[in-house]
Image: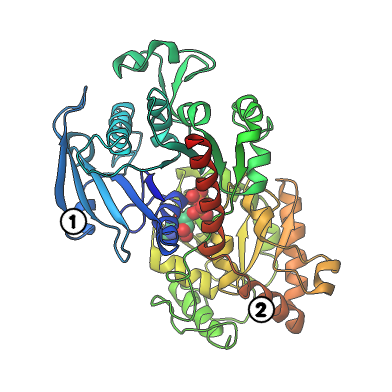
């Protein structure tokens, strides 16, 4: 099968979150199943250089483009997946993030940047870029590629389209005048089109026009049809419920396995867990904490409301009255960053905080902590709980989205039948989080039971293979429906 996979971030070329991890590893897994999947990404500054050898494949004259758009061809590093880079320096060759300027705040021309990216993707999808390759399916991801299924819907001969929601909270909304500026069809300005509360919504392009919608866990697929999680789009999503499904993300065990992780102080595995203690001491050293044999709780992530770190802040006075340590790596909202730094200053022997983004430290934290906290208000899939399971770092999660689908709560029943892998709690409330942590600490004091819990988690298989098969089945079903 021939598939074009469009994404605005792909690990290891450019990453702001889980979307990049998925876009870097799902195509490789599909390729390993012997299908011709190719990835297309904007050529942000430095991306072409990181991709290694590239060649210019085509040059597109797209309406509204501030310059020539070139398609560069390379390979996704470490794989044999062909990679197309949409190269338009005035749009993408800048310092800063893929969506925001170095000083923060979205790029003011994001609508134009991702509309032109979408038009370039359509040229590739319709074999109008001179590649002599026609995909049967176009897989678009998140709002940045939302216009692709919409634009393709205008074509009589087109590939089947799948749109995957990685996080419904990010929708790509722009002022009403944008529709005109981007020369999009005027009749898209309606409730059944791209209009959303008097704004132009890019994500609606995917939600309304794609042949099928998927999201990254079965539970999130159900949740987003409710007002609590639907971000105002629950009506549309319920109306399309017969074309909406959830497939849990996998993780890439080549990058995330404690037996061959170059960032760790010492490797370990499910059969030889001794090295984990060395990683705990190394982590305590990384965070300038005394090397004590007390429970070490950890968190890595974006410091935003979604992740529920404020719940953790609420219970910390009570938590820190216990003999334990806490380490946090993250960046995000200034107030949360400051609150965490203040805690570190007040409790330097118990709390370690690093503000910033560090891939090596994220790996060391997964290896060195005993418990991993994910009190997310919502979590489409979540990756860190999957890494934690693999690293024998018991996750404490809110029962939502992919967290609900990947962690088995250590209830008496699940402890008895040996299926428990972590701790879950229901309400996004501080006392509920505290109660879950207390349950975990009580079990931590029973070394044999704890070891069984850790081991069960380490034995779980969240590799991409299973999820890749699910995507393939869906791809095949959509292509058959389109061609039939
Ligand atoms: P989201 O996509 O909502 O940010 P996920 O759990 O799906 O959350 O994916 C987050 C990814 O980003 C994980 O691979 C996580 O390890 C990584 N990450 C987030 N913040 C940091 C950080 N400060 N340093 C290193 N890695 C981080």
Residue 24 figure quarter:
bottom left
Q: Which residue is mark 2?
A: 455
How many marks the image carries: the answer is 2
Q: Answer above or below: position of 449 versus 127.
A: below
The reply to whether discs 2 and 1 touch (Cβ–Cβ < 8 Å) is no
The Cα atoms of the two marked residues, 2 and 1, are separated by 41 Å
**Image coords of residue 294 (percent x, y):** 64, 77
**Image coords of residue 112 (percent x, y):** 29, 27
Of residue 241 and residue 116, the one placed in the foreground of this image is 241
Crowd around label 2: few <14 · some 14–19 · many ≥20 (10 Å): many
The residue located at (31%, 66%) in the rendering is 78
Q: Answer above or below: position of 43 versus 180.
A: below
The residue located at (59%, 87%) in the rendering is 271
**67 displayed left or right of 145:** left
**Image coords of residue 90 (percent x, y):** 17, 34
Q: Which residue is mark 1?
A: 49
Whichever of labels 2 and 1 marks the residue nearer the N terminus, that label is 1
The residue located at (28%, 30%) in the rendering is 116
Is disc 2 placed on a helix, strand or loop?
A: helix
Q: Answer above or below: position of 256 versus 334.
A: below
């Amino acid at each position: 099968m021939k598939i074009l996979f469009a994404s605005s971030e792909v690990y290891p070329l450019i990453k702001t979150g889980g979307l990049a991890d998925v876009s870097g590893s799902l195509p490789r897994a599909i390729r390993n199943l012997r299908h011709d999947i190719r990835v297309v990404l904007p050529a942000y500054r430095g991306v072409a250089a990181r991709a290694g050898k590239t060649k210019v494949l085509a040059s597109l004259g797209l309406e509204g483009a501030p310059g020539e758009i070139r398609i560069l061809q390379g390979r996704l590093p470490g794989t044999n997946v062909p990679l197309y880079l949409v190269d338009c320096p005035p749009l993408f060759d800048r310092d800063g993030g893929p969506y925001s300027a170095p000083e923060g705040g979205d790029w003011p021309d994001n609508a134009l940047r991702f509309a032109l990216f979408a038009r370039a993707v359509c040229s590739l999808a319709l074999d109008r870029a001179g590649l002599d390759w026609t995909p049967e399916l176009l897989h678009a991801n998140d709002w940045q590629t939302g216009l692709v299924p919409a634009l393709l819907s205008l074509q009589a001969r087109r590939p089947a389209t799948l749109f995957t929601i990685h996080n419904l909270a990010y929708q790509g909304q722009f002022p009403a005048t944008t529709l005109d500026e981007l020369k999009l069809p005027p009749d898209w300005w309606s409730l059944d089109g791209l209009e959303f509360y008097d704004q132009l919504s890019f994500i609606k392009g995917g939600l309304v026009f794609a042949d099928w919608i998927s999201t990254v866990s079965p539970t999130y697929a159900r949740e987003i049809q409710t007002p609590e999680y639907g971000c105002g789009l629950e009506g549309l999503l319920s109306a399309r419920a017969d074309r909406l499904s959830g497939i849990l993300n996998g993780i890439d065990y080549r990058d995330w396995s404690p037996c061959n992780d170059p960032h760790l102080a010492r490797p370990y595995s499910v059969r030889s867990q001794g090295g984990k203690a060395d990683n705990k001491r190394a982590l305590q050293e990384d965070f300038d904490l005394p090397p004590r044999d007390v429970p070490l709780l950890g968190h890595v992530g974006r410091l935003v409301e979604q992740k529920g770190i404020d719940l953790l802040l609420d219970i910390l006075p009570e938590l820190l009255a216990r003999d334990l340590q806490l380490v946090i790596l993250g960046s995000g909202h200034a107030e949360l960053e400051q609150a965490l730094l203040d805690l570190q200053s007040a409790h330097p022997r118990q709390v370690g905080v690093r503000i910033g983004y560090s891939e090596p430290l994220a790996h060391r934290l997964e290896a060195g902590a005993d418990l991993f906290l994910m009190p997310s208000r919502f979590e489409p899939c979540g990756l860190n709980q999957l890494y934690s399971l693999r690293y024998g770092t018991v996750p404490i999660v809110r029962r939502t989205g992919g967290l609900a689908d990947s962690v088995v709560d250590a209830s008496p029943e699940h402890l008895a039948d040996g299926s428990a892998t972590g701790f879950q709690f229901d309400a996004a409330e501080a006392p509920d989080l505290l109660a879950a942590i207390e349950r975990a600490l009580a079990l931590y004091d029973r070394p044999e039971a704890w070891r069984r819990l850790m081991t069960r988690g380490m034995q779980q298989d969240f590799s991409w293979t299973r999820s890749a098969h699910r995507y393939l089945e869906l791809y095949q079903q959509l292509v058959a429906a389109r061609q039939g």
